[in-house]
Amino acid sequence: MTQPRILIVGAGAVGGFFGAKLLLAGRDVTFLVRQARATQLERNGLVLHTPSGDSNTVAPTVTAAELVARREAGTGESWDVVIITVKAFALAGALDDIAAAIGPRTLVLPVLNGMKHIDLLSERFGRDHVLGGLAMVSTTLQGDGSIRQLFGGAGLTYGALAGGTIAPDDTRITALDAALSDAGFSATLSRDIERDLWQKWIVLGSGGALTCLLRAPVGEIVAVPGGTHTALAIVSEFVALATAAGITPDDERLSSIRGTLTQAGSGFTTSMYRDLVQGNPVEADQILGDAVDRANQLGVAVPLLTAASVSLAVYQASRDN
């Protein structure tokens, strides 16, 4: 398999960015999207604005209904790789859509936040299909359907899960690695993807808990008495959870996280905070709720993470009502 067929679930800020880069690099990419997004992409193309320039790419699309119709007619075909880029809270609703694209040797690569989705996908499709993955990019989906990269630099990290049935040197993974490499973003085949996932979770969970609980960017938080102490205490709770789960975070990475969350004058926030202040759904359950649940199971005290999780649960409940 020298040129894997890649299906990207979602053509929003993350999926659209990486998909556009892959298409521009000549890769075989199709987007699984809703009909409205398919019509928009057919009409306008996949428009990407980056600090280094703009592009407009023809974006092949397919809808869930089309996938099912093809499968029922006996004309369906599975993809070699399915990259999942939807928000974590939308994953459960997308599982049936994804199922019609999964074949006996399809790799499923989620680049979602947290760890809960790994269990959900493994239960539905089996550990012999699911990889671990994470995306590092700062993008936003604009009102006209175009995607804007806010800052330079972007990358994907991916790899076989420990305890899974996919060998790290599986030919499917090496083919995926080749397809993602040299495509306009950094691509890293990890030998310890769980540790990578947890370290990103510490960043998102600590930053999300801090900014959402105190409803402010980092600079405003550390400017008041107790702000810096609270930030460091939240990081310590997440590190204690990771350690209890058998993950030893990198000291240099932890130093960077602590520095980011205590920097004077910083405007740093998280996507969860931005969704909160904009009145949008938040990934509270996936990023903080799941962390609190795991902490309770492992006997780790996380009072600040619990307070942040409860605060966001109250917000979500009031929004849903």
Image: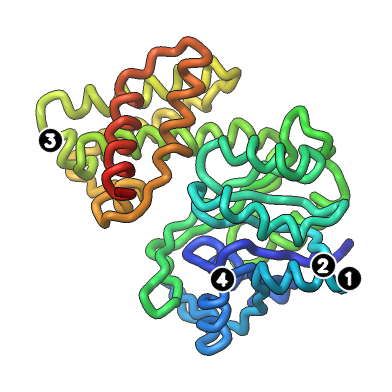
Residue linked to disc 3: 223
Question: Is label 1 in a helix, a strand or a loop?
Answer: loop
At horizontal 52% and vertical 27% (from top left) the residue drawn is 250
Q: CA distance from mark 2 to mark 1?
A: 5 Å
Disc 2 + disc 1, Cβ < 8 Å: yes
Label 1 amino acid? Gly
Label 4 amino acid? Arg
Q: CA distance from mark 1 to mark 4?
A: 22 Å
Q: Choose between 2 and 83: the one closer to the eye.
A: 83
Sequence-wise, the earlier of marks 2 and 3 is 2
At horizontal 55% and vertical 83% (from top left) the residue drawn is 39
Callout 3: few (<14), some (14-19), or many (20+) C-alpha neighbours within 10 Å? some
Q: Choose between 296 and 24: the one closer to the eye.
A: 296
Residue linked to disc 4: 34
Callout 1: few (<14), some (14-19), or many (20+) C-alpha neighbours within 10 Å? few
Label 2 amino acid? Arg
Label 3 amino acid? Ala
Disc 1 + disc 4, Cβ < 8 Å: no
Furthest-bottom residue in this view: 43
Disc 1 + disc 3, Cβ < 8 Å: no
Residue linked to disc 2: 71
Sequence-wise, the earlier of marks 2 and 4 is 4
Sequence-wise, the earlier of marks 4 and 3 is 4
Q: How is the image coloured?
A: rainbow
